[in-house]
Structure formats: C-alpha cells, structure tokens
Image (tube, helix red, strand yellow):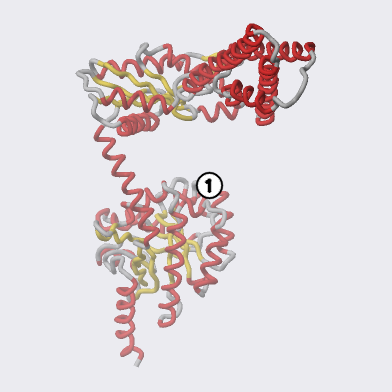
C-alpha cells in the first residue's frame, strides 16, 4: 500500500510539471514577440489563464497546481534573455499532453468521488459489524449492553426482562461432531431465537453457546416467562445440521426489572436463575429468586473466605486424645482441622469441609494438616516415645496421584517415624473404587505407615470388601457405641468387634460419651476408645498439659 501511494504521488507530480510547462509555452510567445498584434499576444495569455483555471477546478488542493500561473509568469521573466522560439510542433505536442493530463485528472475526480463513497459504505458496514456476532449474525455482547443500558435508563411504566439461554451439553456435541457442525448448530439456534421474539426485542450471543434476549415494554412478569418457555420449546425441536438430526436441550434464566437497575445486576440475576435451572436438571426455564440469590451470594462469600483463610493461615489443628481403656491413658491423638474465623470465631469442620472439597482445596488443606500434625507428633515423642498420630485422608486426597510422594516428603521433612503415623479414611471413601483404593493404600503401607478404616460398619457390603483393603485399624462408628446401653445388650458393637478380631485388626471405639459406654467396651475387650467422656478436641498445648499430668501421676507408681 505504501509503495502504491508513493507511485501515485510521483505520477501526480509529473502531471503537474507537464501542465506547468504547457502554461510556460503558451505565455512565452506572447511575452517575447515584439511584432505581434495585441490579439496575438492576448490569445495565448487567455489560453494559459483558462488552462490554469481548469487545473484549479480539477485539483484545487495541490500546491503546485494552485501556484502554477504564478510559477509560469516567474519562469517567463527569468528566461527573457533567451533568443528564438520553440518549434510550433513541440508547442502543440506539449499542449496536447497537458489537455490529456487534465482530462485524465477530471475523470479521476469522478473516481475519487466513487472511492469516497465506497469508503463511507465500508465504514458504515464496519460500524454495523462491530455490533454483530460474526458467527451467528445476531447482536454481540457490546450491542446488548448498550441497548440494555439505554432501555433501563429510560423511565417507563412497563417492565424489562433479560433471558439468558444456554445449550445443555453443547461442548459434548461439539467434541463429538466437530467444530464446523457445532458452529452451524449455533447459527441454527440463533435463527430460532430471533424468530420467536418481537421485532423490538434484542437477541445477542454473549459467549460460546450462551445467548441473551432483551425484552422491553412488558406488562407483567408472566409474559417474559412465556417467551422463555416458547424459545426453549423451539430449541428442543429436532435440528437438522449438516445432514445430522440433533436433539438439543437448552436452559433459560429469567430476570425482570421495572427499570433503574444497572444491566450488570440484572444480567447477574438472570445468570443465577440459569444456574438454578441447570441444578434442577436443565431443559427448563427458571425465574430469578431473591432468596436463592441471597444464598448463592452467601455461598460465594463463604468460598472467598475459605480461600483467604487458607492463604492467610487462619486454620489450625486440634487434637482429640485416643485412650487405652485399661487405665484410660492417652496413647495417641486424632488430628482435626479447625477454622479460627476472624469474625465467627472457632468454626467446626462440618461448616466448611464440604465446601472446601467442592472448591478443590482439600488436597492443599489436608497436606498442611498432615505436616503440622507430624511436626507436633515429633515434639511429643521426645517426651513420650511411641506416641501415635492419626490424620484423616479425604476422597480428593486419596485420588491424588501424588499422595504417596507427598506423604513420603512429609515424613522426611518432619523426621516422624512412619510406624507412628496412622492415616484414616472413611469406609464410604474406600469403597468408592475398591481396586484403586487398595492400590493406593498398599503403596502407602509400603512407606511404613498404618491404615485405619473410619466409621466402620456403616458402609455397604463392608464384610465382603474388608479383606481386599490393607487395613490395620478399624474405628467402630459412634452410632453403635451410643446405642449399647439403650439396647439392653451390645449385639451390634460386639459383632463389629468380633469381625475386627477375625481379620486381626486393632479396634478403636468412637463417640464414647459416658462411663457406662466405656465400661461396656471394656467388657467387650475393646482396647482403645475416644470421645467426649475422655477429652474433647483441643489445641496442642492442651494435649501437652494432659500428657504432663498423666506423667506426674505415674511417677509415684514407678517408685
């Protein structure tokens, strides 16, 4: 383009030089012929003047043309000392060339007008394209936002609705049939959307397979919901795309406002309604529910709090003692995570572990708990050799391919002997994928650690699968323990203990809350237990004080 512009500029300069030379030739004879008549002098001067005027009309913006008559006069005055005249043929040749240049320039002026018109048309086209989705031809996000802001800013007695529509399972269809078919599916969906709304409604594609419809001037809320259901009904009809019949499901979220709200808020409300439709199974429309929205906001805030708590070190580890029922001496502890919330105080795991799991944070949080617990266990073992540390593994940790390497790294960094670490996992987690669980637990046992099965007896088909898992300890579920005094017997707990002994597993009873339960367990020859009857979970300092008291009581006996 730059080279073409340079050549065009050079061509124009040559044209100007030719015309200028013609002016000089016209003026030269009249200025130098002393014996000519007045008419002979005036004719070429008049011709030069007309030629100069023509140049100004054709290209008035060119400096060389604008000053051509003056330049010609200056040239004449500068060469008056030259004698003789040019041949008539040469003069007429140059004049012919000048006329040809002017004709070409004049026709070029029309071309320039056409070019300007084309540029104007192209600019208008580009302006329209800036508001259109290039794939589907409907509006894009920019057009929707500007149109929505305009509509919501105007005072009106009617309502405005925003409907967000999303194709269920589009990614799978796109992967199955290819991107070209996926693009054609989006085009077909956009056509059906546009065909089922009013002329003054706005249809736009926000991103991917998500569309949005702006419905201004509604008399009631039901009208917007009716449009959403009609749109979904049309989208659910079979679509013929590239010879493939597709049955597509879609979901919609509807938000309605009387105006005055910002479009960001209304769009967020429609998104929340769409999310609810997805949670309910998809293929339907849902209206924005302020109560559900408040819950979602609360959940989002809680999610942010958990992430921030992990980054800022707000979590801490508490420990619940595990006692030997023969003398009720503390022989180990179970590490339990707690959240020291800056506003809510100490938060129990039930309030955040499930959410942390859904956010994918449990491997990180669990790894931190494991390292903290092992460091503390080493401190206690300096005074109480053989002291055991139990740490829980979550489902996401068990499925982590780097779990074995991480546990090995913690043991190496902390210096804890592997035989003093007991890794606990619930029976339900272990039975989710029995083969994979057995493989991972076998690899962990190869490090020298022991494995405990928590909540034993509550899982399905526990007996048929127990022998497949490399387990060392079973923890009897608290429901069996707490039912013992009320049942008039201990049949369930006794059966569980019998199973544990059959498989040569060490039993630990959970949830012991009073002395009667502890006595029943002793009668059933259960060696270890934990629960509020002995001690509640406490910070490390509390366990240290408890161990010190037990040590002081043992000194007289040793003497």
User: In the displayed structure, would residue 528 be above or below residue 464?
Assistant: below
User: In the displayed structure, would residue 267 be above or below residue 436?
Assistant: above
Q: Residue at x 24, y 35 (%)?
A: 291
Instruction: Count the labels in the image.
Output: 1
Element under disc 1: loop
Between 25 and 401, the one lying in front of the other is 25
Q: Quadrant of residue 341?
A: bottom left
Q: Which quadrant holds the C terminus?
A: bottom left
Q: Label 1: which residue?
A: 433
Q: Which quadrant holds the N terminus?
A: top right
x, y (%) of residue 251? 40, 25
x, y (%) of residue 52? 60, 16
Q: Residue at x 45, y 70 (%)?
A: 374
Image-based side of 486 in relation to 476, left or right: left
Image-based side of 287 in relation to 508, left or right: left
- Residue 59 in view: yes
x, y (%) of residue 236? 45, 17
Q: Quadrant of residue 314?
A: bottom left
Dot 1, how many residues are within 10 Å of its Cα: few (below 14), some (14-19), or many (20+)? Answer: few
Image-based side of 409 in relation to 98, left or right: left
Between 495 and 163, the one lying in front of the other is 163
Between 345 and 189, the one lying in front of the other is 189
Between 426 and 5, the one lying in front of the other is 5
Residue projecting furthest to the bottom: 559
Q: Residue at x 35, y 67 (%)?
A: 319
Residue projecting furthest to the top: 39
x, y (%) of residue 388? 43, 72
- Residue 247 in view: no
């Amino acid at each position: 383009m730059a080279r073409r512009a340079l050549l065009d500029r050079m061509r124009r300069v040559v044209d100007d030089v030719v015309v200028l030379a013609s002016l000089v030739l016209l003026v030269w004879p009249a200025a130098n012929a002393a014996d000519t008549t007045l008419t002979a002098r005036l004719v070429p001067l008049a011709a030069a003047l007309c030629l100069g005027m023509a140049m100004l009309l054709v290209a008035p913006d060119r400096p060389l043309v604008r000053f051509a008559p003056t330049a010609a006069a200056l040239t004449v005055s500068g060469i008056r000392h030259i004698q003789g005249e040019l041949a008539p043929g040469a003069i007429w040749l140059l004049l012919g060339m000048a006329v040809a240049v002017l004709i070409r320039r004049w026709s070029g002026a029309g071309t320039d007008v056409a070019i300007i018109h084309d540029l104007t048309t192209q600019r208008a086209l580009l302006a329209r394209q800036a508001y259109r989705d290039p794939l589907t031809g409907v509006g894009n996000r920019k057009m929707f936002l500007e149109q929505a802001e305009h509509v919501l800013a105007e005072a009106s007695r009617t309502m405005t609705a925003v409907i967000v529509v999303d194709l269920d399972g589009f990614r799978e269809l796109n992967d199955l049939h290819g991107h070209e078919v996926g693009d054609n599916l989006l085009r077909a969906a956009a056509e059906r959307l546009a065909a089922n709304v009013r002329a003054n409604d706005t249809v736009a594609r926000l991103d991917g397979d998500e569309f949005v419809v702006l419905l201004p001037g509604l008399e009631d809320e039901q009208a917007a919901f009716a449009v959403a259901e009609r749109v979904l009904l049309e989208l659910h009809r079979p679509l013929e795309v590239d010879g493939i019949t597709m049955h597509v499901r879609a979901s919609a979220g509807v938000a309605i406002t009387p105006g005055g709200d910002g479009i960001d808020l209304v769009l967020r409300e429609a998104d929340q309604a769409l999310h609810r439709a997805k949670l309910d199974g998809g293929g339907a429309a849902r209206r924005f529910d302020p109560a559900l929205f408040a819950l979602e906001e609360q959940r989002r805030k809680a999610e942010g709090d958990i992430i921030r708590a992990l980054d800022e070190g707000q979590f801490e580890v508490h420990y619940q003692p595990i006692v030997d029922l023969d003398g009720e001496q503390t022989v180990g502890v179970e590490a339990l995570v707690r959240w020291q919330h800056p506003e809510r105080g100490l938060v129990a795991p039930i309030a955040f572990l499930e959410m942390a799991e859904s956010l994918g944070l449990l491997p990180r949080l669990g790894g931190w708990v494991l390292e903290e617990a092992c460091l503390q266990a080493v401190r206690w073992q300096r005074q109480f050799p053989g002291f055991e540390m139990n740490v829980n593994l979550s489902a996401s940790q068990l499925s982590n391919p780097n779990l074995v390497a991480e546990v090995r790294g913690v043991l190496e960094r902390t210096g804890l002997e592997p035989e003093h670490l007991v890794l606990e996992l619930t029976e339900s987690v272990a039975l989710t994928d029995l083969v994979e669980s057995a493989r991972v637990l076998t690899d962990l046992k190869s490090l020298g650690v022991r494995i405990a099965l928590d909540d034993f007896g509550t899982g399905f088909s526990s007996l048929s699968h127990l022998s497949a898992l490399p387990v060392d300890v079973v923890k009897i579920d608290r429901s069996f323990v707490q039912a013992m005094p009320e049942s008039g017997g201990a049949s369930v707990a006794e059966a569980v203990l019998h199973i544990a002994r059959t498989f040569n597993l060490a039993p630990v009873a959970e949830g012991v809350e009073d002395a009667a339960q502890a006595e029943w367990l002793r009668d059933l020859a259960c060696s270890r237990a934990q629960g509020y009857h002995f001690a509640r979970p406490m910070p490390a300092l509390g366990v240290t004080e408890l161990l010190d008291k037990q040590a002081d009581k043992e000194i007289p006996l040793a003497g």
